[in-house]
């Protein structure tokens, strides 16, 4: 996947977890939880969905790297580089 495909995938997963939120305006450099209504369980659901879909295991110590959209793309892009969209 390209970085743009990873970004789209992350937004898709977020939208599935919190379907009432508009994810189209999420800024890349601002904490996602500061932009949309999402609690810690929703965040964990996103992590679990990525694991279910792609087999990605994110250690708890790395959760903060996923707090922004840009950080999530930076962290996940290398892990998903060989995954077809």
Image (cartoon, rainbow, N blue to C red):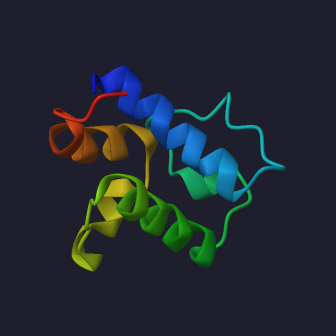
Quadrant placement of the C terminus: top left
Q: How many marks?
A: 0
Residue 14: x, y in percent?
60, 49
Q: Residue at x 55, y 69 (%)?
A: 45
Q: Residue at x 77, y 38 (%)?
A: 22
Residue 38, above or below 24: below
Residue 83, above or below 37: above
Front-most of residues 4 and 84:
84
Residue 18 quadrant = bottom right
Residue 84: x, y in percent?
29, 29
* Left or right side of 2 for 48: right
Front-most of residues 49 and 4:
49
Residue 6: x, y in percent?
37, 33
Residue 7 quadrant = top left
Residue 33: x, y in percent?
60, 58
Quadrant placement of the N terminus: top left
Front-most of residues 61 and 34:
61
Residue 63, above or below 56: below
Determine the residue located farthest toward the right in the rendered image. Answer: 20
* Left or right side of 80 for 29: right
Residue 38 quadrant = bottom right
* Left or right side of 63 for 46: right
Q: Residue at x 48, y 61 (%)?
A: 49
Q: Residue at x 29, y 78 (%)?
A: 60
């Amino acid at each position: 996947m390209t970085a743009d495909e990873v970004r789209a995938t992350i937004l898709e997963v977020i939208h599935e977890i919190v379907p009432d939120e508009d994810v189209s305006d999420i800024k890349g450099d601002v904490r996602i939880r500061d932009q949309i209504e999402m609690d810690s369980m929703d965040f964990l659901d996103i992590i679990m969905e990525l694991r279910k879909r792609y087999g990605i295991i994110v250690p708890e110590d790395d959760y903060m790297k996923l707090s922004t959209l840009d950080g999530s793309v930076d962290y996940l892009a290398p892990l998903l580089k060989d995954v077809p969209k």
